[in-house]
Image (tube, helix red, strand yellow):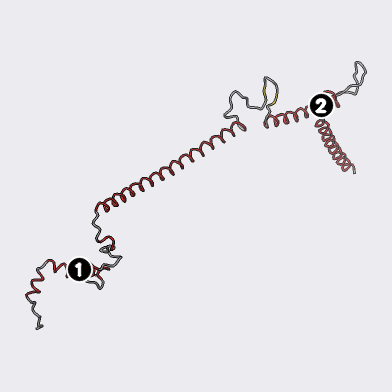
């Protein structure tokens, strides 16, 4: 059998003493503060990283009013910090909201301007063309200039067609009076005369090319 050393009276009493039990547990704990340090060392010579450490200038500070004031100031500072953080967050949120509203407003303005200048949407009491049927004038805008150019080209084609019909259907003099006829050139407006003459040259060149092709085709048939 294994001989066991019996406990002494002091040891048996120590097992029933709560203070000694607590001290023994503190001595055997494995925390950072208890590494190689006794209870007395922890209490009287605690390291700076320990929760038991108190600076020397605060160990014997008995002015509790100052401590309470510092505590209240710290709480007030924390509340003000929270309020300031919420204020900044609200300001940023409002800034983002108004920036978004300005973007939407700018987008709507650009869209309305586009509809007003290019499309018929957004216009009031205006017709579909850049032309005033009451004053018989074109609008002073880009669309009005384009419409004027388009109409001028159509008028030039009309005068060229009238010239072709007159040249093929009439003679060069008036059969009633015997005088020389002026032709279509006298009724062409001055601002269309240049385009009219250029169009006549183009038509003549096309006719010459067409006649030349027909002549070549006929010559090839008889050869």
Q: Residues within 10 Å of mark 2 (few under 14, many from 20)?
A: few
Compare marks 1 and 2 and give the one earlier in the sequence: 1
Among the 4 quarters of the image, the one containing residue 31: bottom left
Residue 219 rendering spot, x and y as whole percentages: 89, 41
Residue at 7 percent across and 77 percent down: it is 8
Looking at the image, the residue that sits furthest to the right is 178
Q: Report the residue marked by disc 1.
A: 26
Label 1: element kind: helix
Labelled pair 1, 2 in contact (Cβ < 8 Å): no
55 and 196: which one is in front? Answer: 55
C-alpha span from label 1 to label 2 = 118 Å
Q: Measured along the vertical axis of the image, is residue 183 above or below residue 12?
A: above
Q: Which residue is mark 2?
A: 190
Mark 2: which secondary structure? Answer: helix
Place of residue 59 in the rendered image (x, y in percent of width and height, measured from the top left): 25, 61
Q: Where in the figure is residue 182, as x and y percent of width and height? A: 88, 23
- Number of numbered discs visible in the structure rendering: 2
The foreground one among 42 and 8 is: 42
**What is the crowding at mark 1: few (fewer than 14 residues within 10 Å), some, or many (at least 20)?**
some
Farthest residue to the left: give it: 9
């Amino acid at each position: 059998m294994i001989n066991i050393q019996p406990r002494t009276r002091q040891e048996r009493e120590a097992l029933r003493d709560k203070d000694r039990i607590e001290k023994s547990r503190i001595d055997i704990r494995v925390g950072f503060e208890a590494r190689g340090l006794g209870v007395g060392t922890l209490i009287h010579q605690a390291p700076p990283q320990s929760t038991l450490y108190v600076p020397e200038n605060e160990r014997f500070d008995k002015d509790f009013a100052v401590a309470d004031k510092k505590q209240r100031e710290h709480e007030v500072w924390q509340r003000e910090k929270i309020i300031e953080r919420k204020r900044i967050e609200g300001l940023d949120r409002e800034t983002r909201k108004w920036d978004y509203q300005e973007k939407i407003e700018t987008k709507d303005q650009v869209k309305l301007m586009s509809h007003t200048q290019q499309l018929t949407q957004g216009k009031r009491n205006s017709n579909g063309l850049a032309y005033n049927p009451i004053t018989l004038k074109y609008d002073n805008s880009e669309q009005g200039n384009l419409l004027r150019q388009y109409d001028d080209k159509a008028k030039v084609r009309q005068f060229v067609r009238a010239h072709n019909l007159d040249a093929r259907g009439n003679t060069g003099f008036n059969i009633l009076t015997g005088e020389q006829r002026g032709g279509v050139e006298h009724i062409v407006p001055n601002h269309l005369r240049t385009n009219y003459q250029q169009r006549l040259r183009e038509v003549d060149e096309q006719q010459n090319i067409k006649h030349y092709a027909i002549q070549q085709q006929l010559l090839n048939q008889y050869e």
